[in-house]
């Protein structure tokens, strides 16, 4: 058998989040560390964050559905994260503004989700748009941020293989990398906290 011959395996019967407009709540903001990206033919390492939401939609076994989106950890005026946060809270991120991403956890919003296909034809849920919340969504409490981080660490280790691990100061507990314009302060691991009983459509970040 040729040891360099690999097979792309099917990802299983995972069902993506349903399409449509969904009230949701932010469960977690995870620091993904430095991730290699390619833009206009140039490859570079950039700090990424993953924002995870839970909606009121349910899976076939009755569990609440979750969906996430990755961003470069930057509040530069042209950065996707700055645009996303601005639409979420209903006002743009101002030049020089600092946002503590910890405050996103537990905040409600409205998501527009569509289904897309990846390079191998698997369907996944894409967050196409976000806006201010129309009603309160309380987290189910089933999401475990520690498990999510361990799963990502295991995946990174498998991808790295025998390569020497990178030294990343961004992953030191409590470290908060600065951005080109403004600052996105990365949170420590934290479970989502439910929003206040009196619903307020104003997002507190």
Image (cartoon, rainbow, N blue to C red):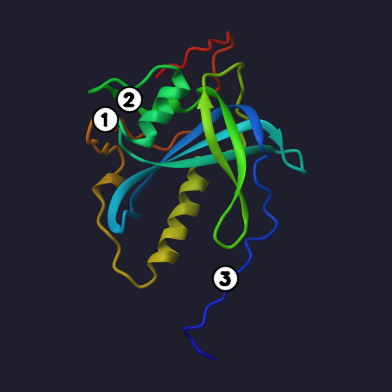
Mark 2 falls on what kind of element? strand
Q: Distance between the residues labelled 3 and 1?
A: 39 Å
Pointer 1 local density, CA inside 10 Å: few below 14, some 14–19, many at least 20? many
Circle 1 residue: 183
Disc 3 is placed on an element classified as loop
Q: How many labels does the image show?
A: 3
When the figure is inspected, residue 145 is found, relative to residue 13, above or below; the finding is above
| Badge 1 or badge 2: first in the primary sequence | 2
Horizontal relation, residue 34 to residue 70: left or right: left
Let me know if residue 144 appears in the view: no
Label 2 close to label 3 by CB (< 8 Å): no
Residue at the farthest top position = 198
Q: Which mark is residue 8?
A: 3
Sequence-first disc among 3 and 1: 3
* Image vertical order of residue 135 relative to residue 169, above or below: above
**Lateral position of residue 113 relative to residue 103, left or right:** right
Q: Position of residue 192 (x, y in %)?
A: 52, 29
Residue found 54% across the figure and 37% down from its top: 127
Identify the residue position indicated by label 2 in the image. Answer: 99
Q: Position of residue 51 (x, y in %)?
A: 47, 37
Q: Do the residues labelled 1 and 2 touch (CB within 8 Å)?
A: yes
């Amino acid at each position: 058998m040729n040891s360099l011959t690999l097979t792309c395996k099917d990802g299983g019967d995972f069902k993506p989040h349903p399409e449509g407009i969904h009230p949701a709540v932010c469960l977690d903001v995870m620091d993904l560390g430095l991730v290699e990206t390619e833009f206009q033919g140039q490859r570079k390492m950039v700090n990424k964050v993953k924002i995870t939401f839970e909606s009121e939609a349910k899976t076939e076994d009755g569990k609440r559905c979750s969906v996430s989106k990755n961003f470069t950890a930057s509040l530069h005026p042209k950065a996707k994260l700055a645009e996303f946060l601005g639409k979420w809270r209903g006002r743009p991120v101002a030049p020089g503004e600092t946002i503590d991403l910890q405050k996103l956890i537990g905040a409600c919003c409205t998501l527009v989700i569509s289904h897309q296909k990846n390079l191998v034809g698997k369907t996944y849920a894409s967050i196409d748009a976000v806006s201010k919340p129309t009603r309160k969504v309380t987290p189910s409490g089933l999401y475990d941020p520690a498990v999510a981080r361990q799963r990502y660490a295991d995946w990174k280790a498998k991808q790295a293989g025998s390569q020497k691990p990178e030294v990343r100061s961004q992953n030191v507990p409590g470290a908060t990398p600065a951005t080109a314009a403004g600052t996105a302060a990365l949170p420590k691991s934290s479970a989502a906290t439910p929003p206040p009983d009196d619903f307020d459509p104003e997002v507190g970040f």
